[in-house]
Amino acid sequence: MSLLASLQEAIYLLVTRDPYVMDIIMVSLNVTGVALILSTLVGVPLGAFLGLTDFPGKPIVTALLYTGMGFPPVVIGLFTFLLLSSVGPLGHLGWLFSVKAMIMAQTIIAFPLVAGFTMAAVMAVDQNLIQQLKALGATRAQAAWAAIKEARIGVLVSIIAGFGGIISEVGAVMLVGGNIEGKTRVLTTAIVLETRKGNFGVAIVFGIILLAITFLANLAMLQLQERDLFAR
Amino acid sequence: MKRVLMAVVLILALLVAGCQQGENGAPAEGESLILATTTSTYDSGLLDYLLPEFEEANNIEVDVIAVGTGQAIEIGKSGDCDIILVHARELEDQFVAEGYGTQRWDVMYNDYVYLGPKGTAEIVAASGSLKEALEAMVEYMEAEGINFVSRGDNSGTHTKEKNLWALLEGRDVESEDWYLSIGQGMGDTLVAANEMQAFTLTDRGTYLAMQDNLPNLEIVFEGDENLFNPYGIIPVNPKKHPHVKHEAAMKLVEFFISDEIQAKIGQFGTEDFGQPLFFPNAR
């Protein structure tokens, strides 16, 4: 199948809302969306805290965070698998081979990215501003919120990085999700499956859909960023 | 700020819609059963052909985890699935003997074939016995600098491949330069062998199903009784893992060994390939 034919096929499947393809897209969006929200909720406050506060042992925490940013996702997948396996410590939850397990692994993969980039962005905010705010009687939380607002472009980039990490992940979700049709099959694992079967055409179709979703999501987030740039 | 808020709300709304769609995809009522099986039964399309009937009749949804036999058995041992359908007789018997599975039932068999680059069939198949064929293959690979691609993933096919190499007494093929262990599923391995124009061992079903995508390969040796490949189904033992759905698993066993489904297994593939991919043998 040529690339053009694949593109046509991709559009056809999307327009006709082919149920198999729609299921895969919906599971992808579900996992990515929830994991991104969770990693933002954990990562942004953590990054802001680390960027604004000095405490003993901070270099070690920072080094751990940076390690987390470059940690092989498949190792996190393996770790999550063993944790959730019925003989593992969290086995009683019964989450293995479910969307919940995938969200868990993806959150662990993405939150260090969000926290790390947020930390860098917050650290770049003018220290005088924060000093002044504190002098004017702002609480620590208020000063942190002001710093995050000031560093919002950097924070947005951190969320974009987290999104990129999640949507492109394949090894970990394959392990903990099991690639079950209609339940835990996402775009990346569907690509692996179709390639394994030698259906390169279908695999490329999924690849195109994945690229399109990533592009649209980034475009939407960039819109926010640019509006912000012009507003300055 | 208003626009930012609106965008955030919009994204959230989309996500929520996504979540709901995802949940709707699965039927709310009814049980679900996790079947850990091999890539060969899934990638060939056999399970997609058989299981809907079971799901409808029993209102049990079957979640298929398609991995190598090695991983499927490990998933069974840790109680992370309810039933396994695999093909590595020794490992299966051990699984039952160690108490992880209740009992093993014959379901079907298919056979293995050796594949090689186009044009090598005359060289290898000319040999009479499997042992001679392996010797001819090794000689040819060494002379021509051609590789043998192995699954290398402890799957049933990999286990079988290792047992067959033992026919070349004392030869440690895994340390040879031409031996490539790629650690992937059957489909990946065939794709790799096709790209490298290498030799490999595959089950006939996966080969027939993928033949159109494998223009560089042909069957170089087949038909020896050592190349027999029986599949067994084993429910995970509820005495080891009380949470497994044993009752539903037993329904699946009865389904697979029923006369009607056995006949369906024997017909699967005849339309597309002119020959069956699996031969029922539950008796």
Image (spheres, coloured by chain):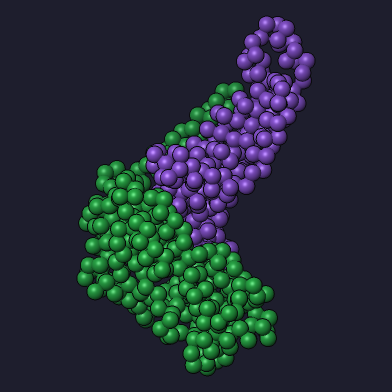
Chain colours: A purple, B green
* Nearer to us in this view, B248 or B226: B226
Left or right for B17, reference A114: left
Q: Is residue B117 above or below residue A231?
A: below
Q: Is residue B212 visible?
A: no
What residue is at 58 percent from the left and 79 percent from the top? Answer: B170
- Image quarter where the C terminus of chain B lies is bottom left
- Residue drawn at point x = 50 percent, y = 52 percent: A174
Q: Nearer the viewer, residue B204 or B166?
A: B166
Report the number of discs: 0
Above or below, comparing residue B208 to residue B188 in the picture: below
Is residue B196 toward the left or the right of residue B102 in the image?
A: right
Query: Which quadrant: the N terminus of chain B?
Result: top right
Is B243 left or right of A165, judged from the image as shown? Answer: left
Q: Quadrant of residue B77?
A: bottom left
Q: Residue at x 74, y 10 (%)?
A: A132
Q: Quick check: A46 left or right of B158?
A: right
The answer to whether residue B88 is seen in the rendering is yes
In the rendered image, residue B220, in percent from the top left (x then y), is placed at: 52, 85
Locate residue B133, reporting x and y percent: 53, 87
Rendered location of residue A85, percent (x, y) = 44, 46
* Residue B189 horizontal/vertical position (percent): 54, 69
Q: Is B258 situated above or below A105?
A: below
Q: Which residue is at 75% across, 12% downward?
A: A131
